[in-house]
Image (spheres, helix red, strand yellow):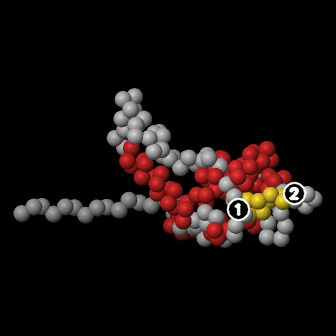
Amino acid sequence: MKLSSRGRYAVVAMADLAIHSSERPVSLAEIAERQEISLSYLEQLFGKLRRNHLVRSVRGPGGGYKLARPGEEVRVADIVVAVDEPLSATRCRPGSATGCHSTRGRCLTHDLWEELGNQIHLYLSSVSLADVVNRRVLGTSGLLMRAGLTRVEPRKLPEPTPAE
């Protein structure tokens, strides 16, 4: 599963806004320049973020955008869902009783991929925008990178004992 640029850019733009909007509203042009994101793309994303009450716009000279709530209250999942980014790892439509096969049945691994999507949503719901800005999301993968390890070797399972 891959999160599209829409979800990634929305989170990056919101993190930028959280950092820079404490004193004054931030223009989309400023975010576009700092984050190297197209201004017209940001306008589309911020329309959705505003409609979902994650940002508020300030009109007039010196206007721009501010967070609608403190960063501690904004979850990454809220941002991703607000810009219509699906958090599904299956080909099936969410909530549909039918599957993705031509027979309308579910594939053998449907439950695996559906649970992966659920876990991703749960994880993104556990991370606040403040966590991202303050770099509090560095988990095991970050520790491995710092230690210079690029992959984790699989653990060897113990041999089963013969039945007596």
Judge from the rendering whether residue 118 lies leftward or rightward of residue 6; answer left or right.
left
Q: Which residue is mark 1?
A: 15
Residue 159 percent location from the top left of the image: 22, 61
Mark 1, Cα crowd under 10 Å, few <14 / some 14-19 / many 20+, is many
Helix, strand or loop for disc 1 = helix
Residue 153 percent location from the top left of the image: 41, 60
Judge from the rendering whether residue 114 lies leftward or rightward of residue 16; answer left or right.
left
Residue 63 percent location from the top left of the image: 87, 59
| Mark 1 residue type | Ala
Residue 13 percent location from the top left of the image: 72, 56
Judge from the rendering whether residue 133 lies leftward or rightward of residue 29; answer left or right.
left
Residue 81 sits above or below residue 72 on the image? above
Give the image quarter of residue 125. bottom right
Residue furthest left in the image: 164
Helix, strand or loop for disc 2 = loop
Residue furthest right in the image: 61
For the C terminus, which image quadrant? bottom left
Task: Give yes or no for contact between labels 2 and 1 (Cβ–Cβ under 8 Å).
Answer: no
Please report the residue visible at 83 percent of the width from the left and 63 percent of the height from the top. 25
